Image (tube, rainbow, N blue to C red):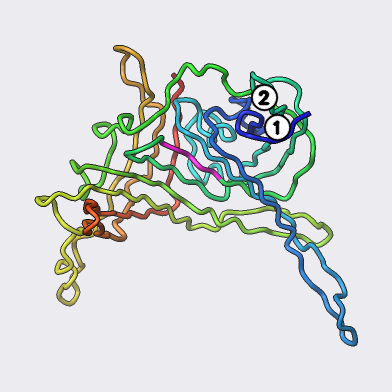
């Protein structure tokens, strides 16, 4: 009989009936959390102090999964498929998420019969975050939101027992193959983050209790932040603001739309040719939103700049199998 649940005794699977290219537990998963909110609405009545009714208006479940990039498919690919797909194309895709729990004393992990499982169906992606730090693993974090959760279910396959691929870290960021903004080209990058909040909103219909649809509220803002190690000879804090003090009927200069494509290669052994595993294409409409200068205090830290770019609606994620 299991006494606890820890990392080796549970695993999570994400599938989509429209894109069943990848099945089984998500490889490289680092954490999973499930939050259920019953969204109670209180109703009182005249003539009585006591509560009249506590009505669950729109119960919903939110699932957040964090994965270390390792050359295997992303969580994104498990429910959209292997081919490149934009946020707009995937906005109506729904995932089935199963959290399976096994014995805490099984030396092989979650490979045998499960003690229990929780299955969430009809889940939409509500936010995504990709982080490429100079220290630590590259990671993916997706949050899903839905209205269905039941006890039961099973994992179609456990995670890989002995992965043939290696974890992805700073040396896998392809500086030469990526398309980066002019302001951070040839700079010493410390961290890159891509994030988007899809802001799901529900549509309800008379005659039905559950949500008819949960849609993305376009236009959708996508943020890309570059942390740069600051050198004395490097430009400080972005374009000169004097470029924005223009004469009447003249357009300000200094902020131009730029293309951003980030390519990440898989870790290979020996002399194998470089292979691009993941591509994040944010299109050619990215604009510099802010530049911050910080650090260099008496504690001995270095000065860093953070260049934040925004674009709208354009993010296509492509996975290339080995």
Q: Earlier in the sequence, mark 1 or mark 2?
A: 1
Residue 126 position within the rendered picture, expressed as x and y whole percent measured from the top left:
57, 50
For the point 50% across and 19% down, the residue is 163
For the residue pair 255 and 59, the one nearer the viewer reads as 59
Q: Is residue 232 left or right of residue 50?
A: left
Q: Is disc 1 surrounded by few (<14), some (14 to 19) or many (20+) residues within 10 Å?
A: many
Residue 141 position within the rendered picture, expressed as x and y whole percent measured from the top left:
51, 42
The local secondary structure at tag 1 comes to strand
Magenta residues (range): 138-142
Q: Is residue 44 at all visible to an observer of this figure?
A: yes
Q: Is residue 251 above or below residue 261?
A: below
Q: Is residue 287 left or right of residue 149?
A: left
Q: Quadrant of the N terminus?
A: top right
For the residue pair 201 and 58, the one nearer the viewer reads as 58
Q: How many marks?
A: 2
For the point 19% across and 50% down, the residue is 230
Outermost residue to the right:
47
Q: Indicate whether residue 240 is drawn in magenta.
A: no
Q: Which residue corresponds to mark 1?
A: 100
Q: Is residue 137 above or below residue 306?
A: above
Residue 252, label in figure: none
Residue 202 position within the rendered picture, expressed as x and y whole percent measured from the top left:
67, 58
Q: Is residue 204 above or below residue 274?
A: below
Q: Quadrant of the C terminus?
A: top left
Tell me, yes or no, whether the two marked residues, 1 and 2, touch with CB atoms within 8 Å. yes
For the point 27% across and 39% down, the residue is 179
Q: Which residue corresponds to mark 2?
A: 110
The local secondary structure at tag 2 comes to loop
């Amino acid at each position: 009989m299991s006494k606890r649940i820890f990392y080796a005794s549970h695993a999570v699977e994400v599938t989509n009936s429209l894109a069943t290219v990848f099945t089984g537990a998500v490889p490289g998963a680092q954490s999973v959390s499930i939050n259920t909110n019953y969204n109670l609405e209180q109703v009182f009545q005249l003539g009585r102090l006591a509560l009249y009714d506590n009505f669950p208006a729109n119960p919903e479940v939110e699932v957040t999964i964090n994965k270390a990039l390792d050359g295997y498919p992303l969580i994104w690919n498990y429910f959209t498929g292997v081919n490149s797909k934009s946020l707009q194309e995937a906005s109506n895709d729904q995932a089935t998420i199963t959290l399976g729990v096994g014995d805490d004393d099984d030396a092989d992990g979650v490979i045998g019969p499960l003690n229990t499982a929780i299955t969430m169906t009809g889940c939409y992606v509500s936010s995504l975050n990709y982080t490429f730090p100079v220290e630590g693993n590259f990671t993916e974090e997706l949050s899903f939101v839905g209205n269905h959760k039941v006890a039961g279910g099973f994992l179609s396959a456990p995670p890989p027992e002995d992965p043939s691929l290696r974890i992805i870290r700073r040396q896998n960021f392809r500086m030469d193959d990526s398309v980066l903004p002019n302001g951070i080209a040839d700079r010493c990058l410390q961290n890159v983050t891509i994030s988007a909040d899809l802001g799901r909103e529900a549509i309800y219909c008379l005659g039905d209790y559950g949500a008819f649809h949960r849609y993305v509220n376009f236009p959708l803002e996508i943020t890309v932040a570059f942390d740069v190690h600051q050198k004395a000879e490097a430009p400080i804090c972005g374009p000169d603001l004097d470029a924005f003090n223009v004469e009447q009927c003249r357009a300000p200069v200094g902020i131009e739309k730029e293309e951003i494509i980030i390519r990440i290669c898989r870790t290979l052994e020996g002399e194998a040719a470089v292979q691009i595993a993941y591509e994040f294409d944010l299109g050619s409409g990215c604009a510099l939103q802010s530049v911050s200068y910080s650090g260099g205090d008496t504690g001995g830290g270095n000065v860093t700049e953070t260049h934040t770019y925004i674009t709208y609606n354009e993010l296509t994620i492509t996975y290339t199998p080995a």
